[in-house]
């Protein structure tokens, strides 16, 4: 389990639909909304 960096929700990496790699680190998201917010930064 990991935390969504936008909203702090606990996410299971195995079932997360949205993820991205930034500066060599993989981030997981609970929703497309959080994914989009993160990628706008």
Image: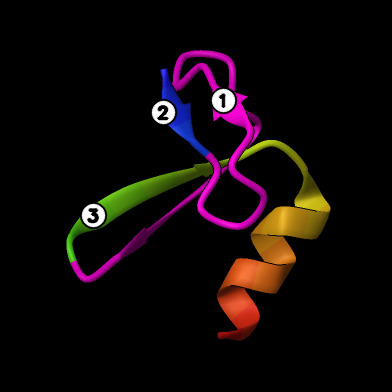
Q: Position of residue 3 (x, y in %)?
A: 48, 36
Local crowd at mark 3 within 10 Å, few (<14), some, or many (≥20)? Answer: few
Mark 1 and mark 2 in contact? Answer it, CB < 8 Å. Answer: yes
**Spatial CA span between label 2 and label 3:** 12 Å
Identify whether 19 is placed above or below 35.
above
- Pick the quarter of the image with the C terminus: bottom right
**Spatial CA span between label 1 and label 3:** 17 Å
Q: Position of residue 14 (x, y in %)?
A: 47, 14
Residue found at the very far right of the displayed protein: 33
Q: Magenta segment: does it hold 14?
A: yes
Residue at (65% x, 31% y) in the render: 17
Residue at (17% x, 61% y) in the render: 24
Residue, disc 1: 10
- Earlier in the chain: of badge 1 and badge 3, it is 1
Residue found at the very far left of the displayed protein: 24
Mark 2 and mark 3 in contact? Answer it, CB < 8 Å. Answer: no
Q: Magenta segment: does it hold 20?
A: yes
- Earlier in the chain: of badge 1 and badge 2, it is 2
In the rendered structure, find residue 2 and report the number of the disc placed on it: 2
Q: Which residues are magenta?
A: 4-23
Residue, disc 3: 25
């Amino acid at each position: 389990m990991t935390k969504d960096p936008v909203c702090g929700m606990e996410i299971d990496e195995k079932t997360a639909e949205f993820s991205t790699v930034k500066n060599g680190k993989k981030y997981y998201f609970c929703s497309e909304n959080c994914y989009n917010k993160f990628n706008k930064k």
